[in-house]
Amino acid sequence: MKIIFLGVGEAFDENIPNNSHLIITEQTKLLLDCGMTAALQVWKFNSDSNFLDAIYISHWHADHYFGLPGLLLRMWEGGRTRPVVIISRKGFEDQFKKLMDLAYLGFREKFKYEINIIETEPSKEINFQDLVLNFNPTIHSGENLAVKISDRKNTVAYSGDGSPVAGTDFYNNLDLLILETYLYDKEIIGHSSIVSAISFAENNNVKCLALTHINRDFRKNELPKIKDKIKSDKVKIIIPEHMDEYDL
Protein backbone atom coordinates (compact mmCIF):
# COMPACT_ATOMS: atom_id res chain seq x y z
CA MET A 1 0.00 0.00 0.00
CA LYS A 2 1.23 3.48 -0.94
CA ILE A 3 -0.13 6.77 0.39
CA ILE A 4 0.22 10.00 -1.57
CA PHE A 5 -0.38 13.11 0.52
CA LEU A 6 -1.91 15.15 -2.30
CA GLY A 7 -2.71 18.06 -0.01
CA VAL A 8 -2.09 18.63 3.69
CA GLY A 9 -3.50 22.13 4.20
CA GLU A 10 -6.42 23.54 6.12
CA ALA A 11 -9.44 25.10 4.40
CA PHE A 12 -8.05 28.57 3.72
CA ASP A 13 -4.33 28.06 3.20
CA GLU A 14 -3.26 29.98 0.09
CA ASN A 15 0.00 28.03 -0.23
CA ILE A 16 -0.89 24.43 0.60
CA PRO A 17 -3.65 22.38 -1.08
CA ASN A 18 -6.61 21.10 0.93
CA ASN A 19 -6.32 17.94 3.02
CA SER A 20 -6.64 15.08 0.49
CA HIS A 21 -4.82 11.79 -0.02
CA LEU A 22 -4.51 8.84 -2.37
CA ILE A 23 -4.45 5.22 -1.27
CA ILE A 24 -2.85 3.03 -3.92
CA THR A 25 -2.80 -0.77 -3.76
CA GLU A 26 -2.30 -3.52 -6.31
CA GLN A 27 -5.95 -3.29 -7.38
CA THR A 28 -7.32 0.05 -6.19
CA LYS A 29 -6.78 3.80 -6.39
CA LEU A 30 -8.89 5.46 -3.69
CA LEU A 31 -9.08 9.24 -3.23
CA LEU A 32 -9.72 10.49 0.31
CA ASP A 33 -11.66 13.76 0.12
CA CYS A 34 -11.83 16.13 -2.83
CA GLY A 35 -11.83 19.74 -1.70
CA MET A 36 -11.49 22.95 -3.67
CA THR A 37 -7.86 22.31 -4.63
CA ALA A 38 -7.76 18.50 -4.57
CA ALA A 39 -8.75 17.91 -8.19
CA LEU A 40 -5.72 19.91 -9.35
CA GLN A 41 -3.47 17.70 -7.23
CA VAL A 42 -4.99 14.52 -8.67
CA TRP A 43 -4.33 15.76 -12.21
CA LYS A 44 -0.75 16.69 -11.34
CA PHE A 45 -0.16 13.18 -10.02
CA ASN A 46 -1.99 11.31 -12.78
CA SER A 47 -4.03 12.89 -15.57
CA ASP A 48 -5.49 9.60 -16.84
CA SER A 49 -9.30 9.93 -16.76
CA ASN A 50 -9.56 6.25 -15.78
CA PHE A 51 -7.02 6.46 -12.95
CA LEU A 52 -9.33 6.58 -9.94
CA ASP A 53 -11.54 3.71 -8.84
CA ALA A 54 -13.29 5.35 -5.90
CA ILE A 55 -13.58 8.55 -3.87
CA TYR A 56 -14.33 8.83 -0.17
CA ILE A 57 -15.91 12.02 1.19
CA SER A 58 -15.55 12.37 4.96
CA HIS A 59 -17.98 15.29 5.32
CA TRP A 60 -19.73 17.98 3.34
CA HIS A 61 -17.58 21.05 3.89
CA ALA A 62 -16.27 22.85 0.82
CA ASP A 63 -12.60 22.06 1.45
CA HIS A 64 -13.48 18.35 1.42
CA TYR A 65 -15.84 17.93 -1.51
CA PHE A 66 -16.24 21.04 -3.69
CA GLY A 67 -13.60 19.68 -6.08
CA LEU A 68 -15.83 16.76 -7.09
CA PRO A 69 -17.69 18.40 -10.00
CA GLY A 70 -14.51 19.46 -11.79
CA LEU A 71 -12.82 16.12 -11.17
CA LEU A 72 -15.78 14.17 -12.56
CA LEU A 73 -16.27 16.51 -15.51
CA ARG A 74 -12.64 16.14 -16.55
CA MET A 75 -13.06 12.35 -16.39
CA TRP A 76 -15.96 12.69 -18.83
CA GLU A 77 -14.06 15.14 -21.03
CA GLY A 78 -11.13 12.69 -21.06
CA GLY A 79 -13.32 9.85 -22.31
CA ARG A 80 -13.83 7.80 -19.16
CA THR A 81 -16.24 4.91 -19.68
CA ARG A 82 -15.80 2.71 -16.61
CA PRO A 83 -17.78 3.35 -13.42
CA VAL A 84 -16.48 5.31 -10.45
CA VAL A 85 -17.68 4.83 -6.87
CA ILE A 86 -18.24 7.65 -4.39
CA ILE A 87 -18.60 6.72 -0.71
CA SER A 88 -19.97 9.06 1.95
CA ARG A 89 -22.46 9.18 4.80
CA LYS A 90 -26.22 8.78 4.50
CA GLY A 91 -27.95 11.46 2.45
CA PHE A 92 -25.01 12.02 0.12
CA GLU A 93 -26.84 11.01 -3.05
CA ASP A 94 -29.22 13.97 -2.76
CA GLN A 95 -26.40 16.29 -1.70
CA PHE A 96 -24.30 15.18 -4.66
CA LYS A 97 -27.10 15.92 -7.15
CA LYS A 98 -27.44 19.44 -5.74
CA LEU A 99 -23.70 20.00 -5.93
CA MET A 100 -23.44 18.82 -9.54
CA ASP A 101 -26.42 20.88 -10.67
CA LEU A 102 -25.05 23.98 -8.97
CA ALA A 103 -21.60 23.53 -10.51
CA TYR A 104 -22.48 22.21 -14.00
CA LEU A 105 -26.23 22.11 -14.57
CA GLY A 106 -27.25 19.36 -16.97
CA PHE A 107 -23.78 17.88 -17.48
CA ARG A 108 -24.23 14.86 -15.20
CA GLU A 109 -26.71 13.37 -17.68
CA LYS A 110 -24.09 13.61 -20.44
CA PHE A 111 -21.54 11.42 -18.70
CA LYS A 112 -20.65 8.20 -20.53
CA TYR A 113 -19.71 6.47 -17.28
CA GLU A 114 -21.68 5.51 -14.18
CA ILE A 115 -21.27 7.27 -10.84
CA ASN A 116 -22.23 4.76 -8.16
CA ILE A 117 -22.98 6.28 -4.75
CA ILE A 118 -22.51 4.13 -1.65
CA GLU A 119 -23.94 5.67 1.51
CA THR A 120 -22.40 4.50 4.74
CA GLU A 121 -22.65 4.84 8.53
CA PRO A 122 -20.47 3.99 11.55
CA SER A 123 -21.73 0.43 11.87
CA LYS A 124 -21.21 -0.45 8.21
CA GLU A 125 -18.29 -2.32 6.66
CA ILE A 126 -17.66 -1.96 2.94
CA ASN A 127 -15.60 -4.38 0.88
CA PHE A 128 -14.32 -2.70 -2.27
CA GLN A 129 -11.97 -4.63 -4.56
CA ASP A 130 -8.96 -5.48 -2.33
CA LEU A 131 -9.91 -3.02 0.43
CA VAL A 132 -12.03 -3.24 3.58
CA LEU A 133 -13.43 0.08 4.81
CA ASN A 134 -14.86 0.88 8.24
CA PHE A 135 -16.12 4.18 9.63
CA ASN A 136 -16.24 6.07 12.91
CA PRO A 137 -17.60 9.53 13.83
CA THR A 138 -15.31 12.34 14.94
CA ILE A 139 -16.04 15.45 17.00
CA HIS A 140 -16.45 18.22 14.42
CA SER A 141 -18.71 21.16 13.59
CA GLY A 142 -20.36 19.04 10.89
CA GLU A 143 -21.10 15.33 10.78
CA ASN A 144 -17.81 13.68 9.83
CA LEU A 145 -16.84 10.04 9.49
CA ALA A 146 -13.25 8.91 9.83
CA VAL A 147 -12.42 5.97 7.57
CA LYS A 148 -10.20 2.95 8.30
CA ILE A 149 -8.80 1.19 5.25
CA SER A 150 -7.21 -2.26 5.18
CA ASP A 151 -5.75 -4.24 2.31
CA ARG A 152 -5.53 -7.21 4.72
CA LYS A 153 -1.81 -6.56 5.13
CA ASN A 154 -1.71 -2.96 6.33
CA THR A 155 -4.26 -0.64 7.90
CA VAL A 156 -4.55 3.13 7.54
CA ALA A 157 -7.07 5.51 9.09
CA TYR A 158 -7.91 9.01 7.89
CA SER A 159 -9.78 11.31 10.24
CA GLY A 160 -11.21 13.78 7.76
CA ASP A 161 -11.89 16.66 10.15
CA GLY A 162 -12.49 16.52 13.87
CA SER A 163 -11.04 15.02 17.00
CA PRO A 164 -11.23 11.22 17.19
CA VAL A 165 -13.60 9.78 19.77
CA ALA A 166 -11.81 8.06 22.65
CA GLY A 167 -12.86 4.72 24.11
CA THR A 168 -13.09 2.78 20.87
CA ASP A 169 -10.79 0.17 19.32
CA PHE A 170 -11.26 1.73 15.86
CA TYR A 171 -7.75 3.22 15.88
CA ASN A 172 -5.90 0.43 17.68
CA ASN A 173 -2.66 -0.86 16.14
CA LEU A 174 -2.81 1.19 12.95
CA ASP A 175 0.15 1.19 10.60
CA LEU A 176 -0.62 4.83 9.74
CA LEU A 177 -3.02 7.40 11.18
CA ILE A 178 -3.57 10.55 9.09
CA LEU A 179 -4.97 12.91 11.69
CA GLU A 180 -5.91 16.54 11.21
CA THR A 181 -4.48 18.97 13.74
CA TYR A 182 -4.81 22.74 13.90
CA LEU A 183 -2.56 24.23 16.59
CA TYR A 184 0.19 22.89 18.85
CA ASP A 185 -1.47 22.49 22.24
CA LYS A 186 -4.71 24.48 21.99
CA GLU A 187 -7.92 22.60 21.31
CA ILE A 188 -10.11 24.38 18.78
CA ILE A 189 -13.70 23.13 18.69
CA GLY A 190 -13.92 20.55 15.94
CA HIS A 191 -10.17 20.07 15.53
CA SER A 192 -7.35 18.16 17.22
CA SER A 193 -4.12 19.72 18.43
CA ILE A 194 -0.67 18.30 17.77
CA VAL A 195 -0.21 17.44 21.45
CA SER A 196 -3.56 15.66 21.74
CA ALA A 197 -2.95 13.82 18.46
CA ILE A 198 0.37 12.44 19.68
CA SER A 199 -1.16 11.34 22.99
CA PHE A 200 -4.04 9.69 21.17
CA ALA A 201 -1.71 7.82 18.80
CA GLU A 202 0.46 6.62 21.69
CA ASN A 203 -2.57 5.35 23.62
CA ASN A 204 -3.77 3.42 20.56
CA ASN A 205 -0.44 1.81 19.67
CA VAL A 206 -0.28 3.58 16.30
CA LYS A 207 2.96 2.92 14.42
CA CYS A 208 3.09 6.16 12.40
CA LEU A 209 1.18 9.43 12.85
CA ALA A 210 0.88 11.90 9.97
CA LEU A 211 -0.10 15.42 11.09
CA THR A 212 -2.07 17.40 8.50
CA HIS A 213 -4.53 20.34 8.24
CA ILE A 214 -2.25 22.56 10.38
CA ASN A 215 -3.31 26.21 10.70
CA ARG A 216 -1.72 28.24 7.92
CA ASP A 217 -0.26 30.98 10.18
CA PHE A 218 0.98 28.51 12.79
CA ARG A 219 2.53 26.32 10.09
CA LYS A 220 4.35 29.28 8.54
CA ASN A 221 5.45 31.18 11.64
CA GLU A 222 5.57 28.85 14.64
CA LEU A 223 5.98 25.29 13.40
CA PRO A 224 9.61 25.70 12.24
CA LYS A 225 10.54 26.90 15.75
CA ILE A 226 9.03 23.97 17.64
CA LYS A 227 9.55 21.00 15.30
CA ASP A 228 12.08 19.52 17.72
CA LYS A 229 9.34 19.35 20.39
CA ILE A 230 7.09 17.28 18.16
CA LYS A 231 8.32 13.79 19.00
CA SER A 232 7.40 10.57 20.72
CA ASP A 233 9.24 7.54 22.06
CA LYS A 234 6.34 5.30 21.01
CA VAL A 235 5.12 6.63 17.65
CA LYS A 236 6.86 7.67 14.46
CA ILE A 237 5.64 11.19 13.65
CA ILE A 238 5.70 12.80 10.22
CA ILE A 239 4.50 16.20 9.03
CA PRO A 240 4.14 15.58 5.31
CA GLU A 241 4.32 18.17 2.57
CA HIS A 242 1.90 17.98 -0.33
CA MET A 243 2.82 15.30 -2.86
CA ASP A 244 4.96 13.40 -0.35
CA GLU A 245 4.65 9.59 -0.52
CA TYR A 246 4.60 6.99 2.23
CA ASP A 247 5.00 3.26 1.63
CA LEU A 248 3.65 0.47 3.83
Image (cartoon, helix red, strand yellow):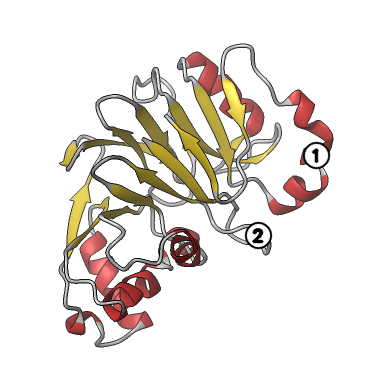
Marks 1 and 2, how far apart in space? 17 Å
Residue 197 percent coordinates (x, y): 57, 28
> Could you classify mark 1 by the number of other residues whose Cα lies within 10 Å: few (under 14), some (14-19), or many (20 or more)?
few
Examine the rendering and report whether any part of residue 140 can be seen.
no
Q: Secondary structure at mark 1?
A: helix
Q: In x, y percent, where is residue 142?
A: 43, 52
Position of 219 with respect to 121 (left or right) is right
Q: Amino acid at mark 1?
A: Pro
* Residue visible at 49% across and 63% down in the picture: 44
Is the N terminus in the top left, top right, bottom left or bottom right quadrant?
A: top left
**Which image quadrant: the C terminus?**
top left
On the question of residue 37 being in view, the answer is yes
Q: Name the residue beneath numbered marker 2.
A: 13
Label 1: which residue?
A: 224
**Residue 192: quarter of image:** top right
Q: Which of 43 and 170 lies nearest the eye of the viewer?
A: 43
Between 170 and 186, the one lying in front of the other is 170
